[in-house]
Image: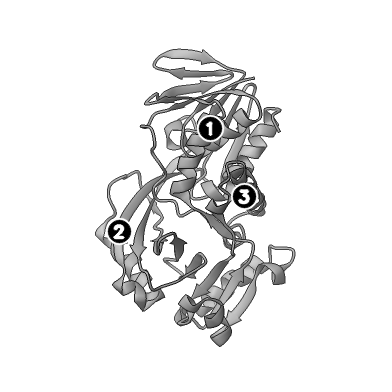
Amino acid sequence: MRIGIAGGGLIGRLLAWRCAAAGAEVEVFDAGAAGRCAPAAAGMLAPVAELARASRALHARGMESCRLWPRWLAEEDAAGLCVQRGAWLTAHGRDRGELERVADAIAAKVPDPDEHLIGYAGKELAEMEPALAGFERAYLLPAEGQVLVDEVLELLGGAAARAGVSWRDGAAVEEVGPGRLRAAGTDKRYDWACDCRGLGARPAQQLRAVRGECLHVHCPGLGLRRPTHVLHPRQPVYIVPRPADVYVVGATEIESDDPGPVTVRSALELLGAAYAFNPLLAEGRVVDARVGLRPALPDNEPALRVGDGELALSGMHRHGYLAGPACVSEALAAMGLA
């Protein structure tokens, strides 16, 4: 089976690798340069936390992705790039009502709330996660975790190449149709043509851009072990640990096509949230500031569309790492490669 893929971001790489691993002949066309990445992603696997404002379908895909990530990465001896210690849901004292509202919304959607939401407070919380000693209460979400995004993207490119995927960098696909990709005015024929271009698929798909900004802060003394969602009625944030005492603080969600650097307003909001989270972060060093434009559909949830010899994986929004493996698995099944 010959498969052509338009787009070499996270989803394109995942799909190419898994198709090639299943025995297909795969060719990827990517408009960008070799080695590019999705810079504003924190790699959170948050199928439970997302239930507060997302569908049960996204939750199911997220839970499936939490199972697939370590299994697939283990094939490359890289299971350690998926860290599953759970995650925290918390809020400052003045926002305690928001914490309980979100916890109640999640509990109403999961079959076993006591397994997915475990409350900690006071001394017990401080012992479990010392970096949260300044918070009165938090919920542990045991099913959650993270993937190390920079490392995973690099690994996926190498894994796809080792599986025999052909790569065409700097080759923008102008159109995807049944069994064909049009690039540089020339049609190329395949058994399946797959559209993973993200925002590059506009206007053929009803996609819009959502700008996301995040900061990387080096803070050796913090010691946070798990991704943490800090709730707020207007501006919730997350703090996500990375190797070498670096923490990702994010992320803004702005309806904008602007790919420019992080704005002063956003930086102030994120830094203020970091300082309020733990005073130790006041002495941290901002080592990176990243911006990404996320492709979103009207309902803000990923979609798999399958036709005769063509499929599209689109609208990943901020759920690429959460839903990507599950969506790719569904695409493989649609092409008879499961």
Q: Amino acid at mark 2?
A: Val
Percent position of residue 86, x then y:
59, 65
SS for dot 1: helix
**207 with respect to 105 (left or right):** left
SS for dot 2: strand
Q: Quadrant of residue 253?
A: bottom left
Identify residue for label 2. Answer: 287
Circle 1 residues within 10 Å: few <14, some 14–19, many ≥20: many
SS for dot 3: helix
Percent position of residue 238, x then y:
45, 64
Q: Earlier in the sequence, mark 1 or mark 3?
A: 3
Residue name at image x 60 percent, y 48 percent? 69
| Residues at marks 1 and 3, CA–CA distance in whole angstroms | 17 Å
| Residues at marks 2 and 1, CA–CA distance in whole angstroms | 30 Å
Circle 3 residues within 10 Å: few <14, some 14–19, many ≥20: some
**164 with respect to 23 (left or right):** left
Q: For the C terminus, which image quadrant?
A: top right
Identify residue for label 3. Answer: 70
Q: Earlier in the sequence, mark 3 or mark 2?
A: 3
Residue farthest left in this picture: 264
| Residues at marks 3 and 2, CA–CA distance in whole angstroms | 29 Å
Identify residue for label 1. Answer: 160
Q: Is residue 136 above or below residue 106?
A: below
Q: Are marks 3 and 2 in contact (CB under 8 Å)?
A: no
Q: Amino acid at mark 3?
A: Pro
